[in-house]
């Protein structure tokens, strides 16, 4: 597949809709992270973690503490919560039990406290109108993706959604990104990875995608600029604004 040029149908479509942000030049596929990029899910995740800890007779950690634990999938989130209480995560039976409990608590209510970040809907709507293919690549278990997208009426925006357990590896491994590009017949150099954490940027770079980051998400307290994304925007609606 050849590179998209300014005169191509896709570029013309982007220009017609005002999608002149330099990150989008020649881009046919955009992969979005979910937690910390499109949605702030920490309030619901923290609630489920605290219920899991209560099951174990442990004190709640609260939203602010759990916020720094998010980004590497549900099992790592649970392990970090247990480690915060001094529990040894080499106790496999304990980790399995608590992980299962966390998933059950989260499944019971994954969205009532979760919110879309400002500019997200405007961004996704604009990109879809411009004909850009959108995929979702998250480390969240696949079972939670559909309920969350349905809750926010976003399912129709994505042609493919991959969770942390959809393939044998997840971000920062580039495999999910390469899988999506191959599935949609798009060369990696015509794809953009959008995320909030170093794992998103590392996966994008390893896959040969262009990378764009937002600074408001979950990156374990570190500035996302340190991961050297190709682009950084304060809000995702910058991608569909007229420049």
Image (cartoon, rainbow, N blue to C red):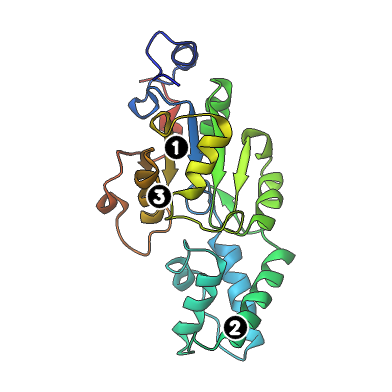
Which class describes the residues within 10 Å of circle 2: few (<14), some (14-19), or many (20+)? many
Of residue 187 and residue 217, the one placed in the foreground of this image is: 187
Camera-nearest label, 3 or 2: 3
At 62% from the left and 76% from the top, the residue drawn is 99
Of residue 159 and residue 224, the one placed in the foreground of this image is: 159
Picture quarter with the N terminus? top left
Q: CA distance from mark 1 to mark 3?
A: 19 Å
Q: Position of residue 20 (x, y in %)?
A: 38, 20
Q: Secondary structure at mark 3?
A: helix
Residue 130 visible to an observer of this rendering: yes
List the residue tagged with mark 2: 53
Of residue 43 and residue 75, the one placed in the foreground of this image is: 75
Picture quarter with the C terminus? top left
List the residue tagged with mark 3: 203
List the residue tagged with mark 1: 236
Precedes in sequence: disc 1 or disc 2 = 2
Precedes in sequence: disc 1 or disc 3 = 3
């Amino acid at each position: 597949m050849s590179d998209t040029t300014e005169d191509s149908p896709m570029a013309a479509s982007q220009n017609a809709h005002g999608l002149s942000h330099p990150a989008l030049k020649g881009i046919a596929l955009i992969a979005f992270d979910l937690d910390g990029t499109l949605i702030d899910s920490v309030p619901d995740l923290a609630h489920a973690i605290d219920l899991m800890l209560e099951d174990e007779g442990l004190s709640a950690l609260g939203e602010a503490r759990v916020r720094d634990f998010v980004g590497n999938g549900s099992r790592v989130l649970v392990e970090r919560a247990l480690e915060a209480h001094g529990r040894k995560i080499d106790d496999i039976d304990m980790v399995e039990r608590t992980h299962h409990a966390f998933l059950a608590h989260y499944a019971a209510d994954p969205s009532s406290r979760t919110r879309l970040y400002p500019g997200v809907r405007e961004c996704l709507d604009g990109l879809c109108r411009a004909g850009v293919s959108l995929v979702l690549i998250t480390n969240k278990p696949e079972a939670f993706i559909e309920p969350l997208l349905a809750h926010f009426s976003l399912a129709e925006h994505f042609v493919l959604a991959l969770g942390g357990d959809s393939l044998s590896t997840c971000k920062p491994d580039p495999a999910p990104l390469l899988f999506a590009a191959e599935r949609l017949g798009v060369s990696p150099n015509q794809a953009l990875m959008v995320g909030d954490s170093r794992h998103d940027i590392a996966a994008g770079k390893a896959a040969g995608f262009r990378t764009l980051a937002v600074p408001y998400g979950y990156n374990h307290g570190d500035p996302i600029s340190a991961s050297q994304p190709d682009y950084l925007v304060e809000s995702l609606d910058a991608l569909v604004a007229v420049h």
